[in-house]
Image (cartoon, rainbow, N blue to C red):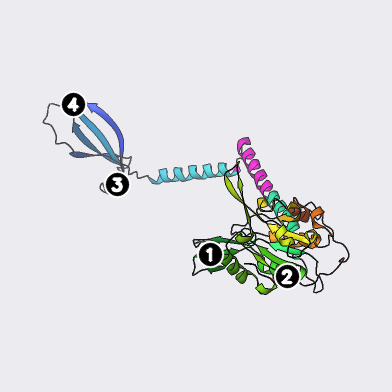
Amino acid sequence: MSTEDGILCLERFRTIEQPDEEEEIIGKAKECYGEGEKGEIKKKHHHHYIVDEDGTRIETLMADVEISLTDDERKQKAAFDDFVSKIDRETPKTEVIQRRHEKKQERRERKEKKKNVVQQLQASISPTVPTRSANKRFPVLLVLDLDGTLVHSEFQRRTYQQHDFSLFNEEIFVYKRPYLDYFISTILEWFDVAVWTASGCEYAAEIVRHVFPDPSKISFLFSSERCTNKYCPATGERIVIKDMKKVKRKGFDLRRVLIVDDTPSTWQRNYGNAVHIESYWGSRIDDHLLHLLTYLEYLGHESDVRRVDKRRWRNQVLGSVITHPASLTGQANDSESDSDC
């Protein structure tokens, strides 16, 4: 290895007295070589001299680490390396290392056990798609909300998720709740279906046109014009209320009317008819509509849906508490389509 290519490392500094001879130029180096037994070069280094302010000369020993071993030294080094590696292989782990290995193994086993439990739990509560029968029909009117219940709308396009459809020349981007198409086709066979939303008339009509395969099959469409606005003194906010008296005036019996909405305050005058569903914000991981179908099928057999406690209905479905009667108590006649939008 040449002097220029060697690895320079700072080995030591030492202060020496200034000699009588003429001062050497700062940075000038002289080479020193050490010799081995057979005249073989073992180490070579450079002496750099720097003159301090007070005239003291500081010698800096900069060494190029370049060691050449003799044949005997190489054999001794190889024998020592073999001895060390043999000891590492044969020496048993200390108690600290063994304890650390055991803890690591325990963590791995707990992680695997937790993973298996989660998989079993997901398999046990995974939603089962209710089977549809051609002759199944319940004498119940099902009133559905739109925003937050069936769909979620935004004014800006998501870069990480594809929207299902857009409205008004891509001014509004709409995301359908998972299993919505199957949910709509099923409830149209089971119930009389209506829509009541707090949104505007034009917006509601466009959503219905995209969500329902045949909008003429819904019994009526109510928008914000049919809602009642109430001022809350405590919060200073406006509360939108959907009064079921307006549905009763259309000839429907409130004992056989169900409401599905994500805002409980909207149905504060008719809690007995309401089935609260968790608000939807556009996620692709959602199974509420499948569980809701199972619960609606159960409520369809009730003579008065207002007498059924609908709180925590999802837990009842997941816990398999719901039992279905053997047969239907009656059949409902198809109501005429009527839009009040």
Amino acid of disc 3 = Gly
Mark 4 or mark 2: name the one nearer the start of the chain. Answer: 4
- Residue 5 is left or right of residue 310, and the answer is left
| Badge 1: residue crowd in 10 Å (few <14, some 14–19, many ≥20) | many
Q: Which residue is mark 4?
A: 56
User: Closer to the camera, 269 or 208?
Assistant: 269
Question: Which of the 4 image quadrants contains residue 193?
Answer: bottom right
Mark 3 or mark 4: name the one nearer the start of the chain. Answer: 3
Q: Nearer the viewer, mark 4 or mark 2?
A: 2
Quarter of the rendering occupied by the C terminus? bottom right
Q: Which residue is mark 2?
A: 188
Residue range in magenta is 90-111
Q: Nearer the viewer, mark 3 or mark 1?
A: 1
Contact, CB < 8 Å: mark 4 with mark 1?
no
Alpha-carbon span between mark 2 and mark 3: 85 Å
- The dot on residue 6 is 3
Alpha-carbon span between mark 4 and mark 1: 81 Å
Q: Is residue 104 magenta?
A: yes
In the depicted structure, whether residue 146 falls above or below residue 91: below
Residue at image x 77%, y 72%? 334
Name the spot of residue 228 as percent of width and height, x first: 63, 55
